[in-house]
Amino acid sequence: MGRIGKPEHTPAPWRYIDEYSMVVSDVAQDINHDRFKGFNEKIRGGFLICESVPLTTNGELIAAAPEMLEALEIAQHWGYGQTPSIEEEEKVQNAIKKARGL
């Protein structure tokens, strides 16, 4: 098992900027729509994923979404008798830590 298909979301890493209550990425989104033109411009140190996230814990959770998806895709086969590698276990643990702001 593995990825079901190529993810269509903005690639990781995403990070929460508490000072501005926003989640940003280092990678520009491929958006070709007049309504979202500003999303392709770097602001406050990154490309906007979402804004107006008043709680740091929520921002950290949102910022961890790409890594959590990858961790779930890795972990989905563990129930089928496959033993996780050390690298896979670390990716899962790192995604959990990032989501918890650790």
Image (spheres, rainbow, N blue to C red):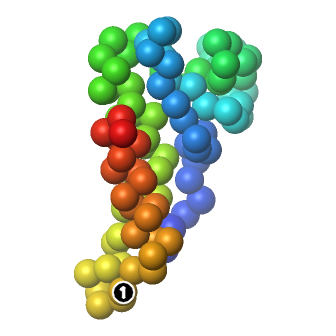
For image coordinates 50% across by 19% down, the residue present is: 17
Q: How many marks?
A: 1
Label 1: which residue? 83
Residue at point 45%, 80% (across, down): 85
Q: In the drawing, does residue 90 fall left or right of residue 7?
A: left
Nearer to me, 5 or 94: 94
- 55 displayed left or right of 43: left
| Coordinates of residue 102 in the picture (x, y in percent) | 36, 39
Can the viewer see residue 73 in this picture? no
Tell me the quarter of the picture where residue 69 sits.
bottom left
Please say if 87 is above or below 51. Answer: below
The extreme bottom residue here reads 81
Q: Amino acid at mark 1?
A: Thr
Residue density around tag 1, few if under 14, some if 14–19, many if 20 or more, within 10 Å: few
Tell me where residue 13 appears, x and y as whole percent.
Answer: 58, 41
Point out the image quarter for the N terminus: bottom left
**Which residue sits at x=34%, y=50%?**
96
Residue 73 horizontal/vertical position (percent): 42, 65
Residue beneath the point at 69% across and 35% down:
27
Name the image quarter holding residue 55. Answer: top left
Q: Is residue 3 visible?
A: yes
Q: Is residue 76 above or below residue 63?
A: below
Q: Identify the image quadrant of residue 80.
A: bottom left
Camera-side residue of 87 and 64: 87
Helix, strand or loop under label 1? loop
From this viewpoint, which residue is outermost toward the front? 102
x, y percentage for residue 74?
42, 69
Q: 10 or 81: nearer the eye?
A: 81
